[in-house]
Image (spheres, rainbow, N blue to C red):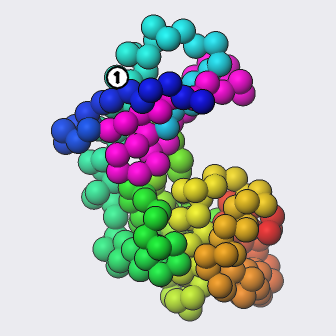
Amino acid sequence: MPNTPYSIQDQEGNQLDVFVYPDRRLKKSARWVRKDEKTIVVRIPYRMARQNMDTLLDDVRRQLGKMRKPARRRTDDDLQHRADTVNQKYFNGTITWNSIRWVSNMRNRLGSCTNGGVTDGNIRISDRIHDWPQWVVDYVIAHELAHRVHSDHGGEFWGYLRSAYPFVDKAIGFIEGIGYATKETLNLDGISDS
């Protein structure tokens, strides 16, 4: 369990609560994720000395400043609007992210979502799906938004996604069909794990 939350200010002067959890899996460095607009969760190495917290919090504050400016420039308005719609309709508006944009450098991967670090909350969607049916594009968006809650492809992730978005299996079938027709392996960070 975390201690009393730490409090920091971001570059825009917003007050943020930082909850710190010791994690036995981490050996050297801390990992953090922005849970919502006012909360950051930091996992630290289990044996990390408490006197290092000021340095760690300064690092988180610095990384927050770096991630905000470029992410705003990269967000494609149409994709952002669609993601907002998917979030409201299927996730009751509970998911937060920093940016979502079309990219041209993903060939077999259809989307990605970053949790933690400087690029926390950045979602990239392959522009190769730009003209696919809207319900498939919405599935790719929903898949990446669900990663803001469950970062892996375990049972909880798939249960969460399937309970939120009703066309998961239909969309996966469509994607597998495109892959079969083009003799490519298409995936969303492990779509075959479904």
Residue drawn at point x = 23 percent, y = 42 percent: 14
Callout 1: few (<14), some (14-19), or many (20+) C-alpha neighbours within 10 Å? few
Residue drawn at point x = 80 percent, y = 69 percent: 194
For this rendering, which residue is in front, 190 or 89?
89
152 is higher (above) or lower (below) than 22 = below
Report the amino acid beneath label 1. Answer: Asp
Highlighted magenta segment, given as a residue range: 16-40
Q: Where is residue 109 in the image (x, y as percent from the top left)?
A: 64, 65
Residue drawn at point x = 26 percent, y = 38 percent: 15
Element at label 1 = helix
Q: Quadrant of residue 185?
A: bottom right
Image side of residue 95 versus residue 173, left or right: left
- Which residue of the protein is positioned furthest toward the left in this rendering? 13
Q: Position of residue 52 (x, y in %)?
A: 46, 11
Q: Position of residue 169 (x, y in %)?
A: 75, 83
Q: Where is residue 21 in the image (x, y as percent from the top left)?
A: 57, 29
Image side of residue 142 versus residue 69, left or right: right
- Which residue of the protein is positioned furthest toward the bottom in this rendering? 133
The answer to whether residue 63 is visible is: no
16 is higher (above) or lower (below) than 159 = above
Image side of residue 175 versus residue 135, left or right: right
Residue at the spot of label 1 = 58
175 is higher (above) or lower (below) than 65 = below
Magenta stretch containing residue 30, yes or no?
yes
For this rendering, which residue is in front, 84 or 72?
84
- In the rendered view of the protein, which quadrant contains the N terminus? top right
Magenta stretch containing residue 157, yes or no?
no
55 is higher (above) or lower (below) than 26 = above
Number of labelled discs? 1
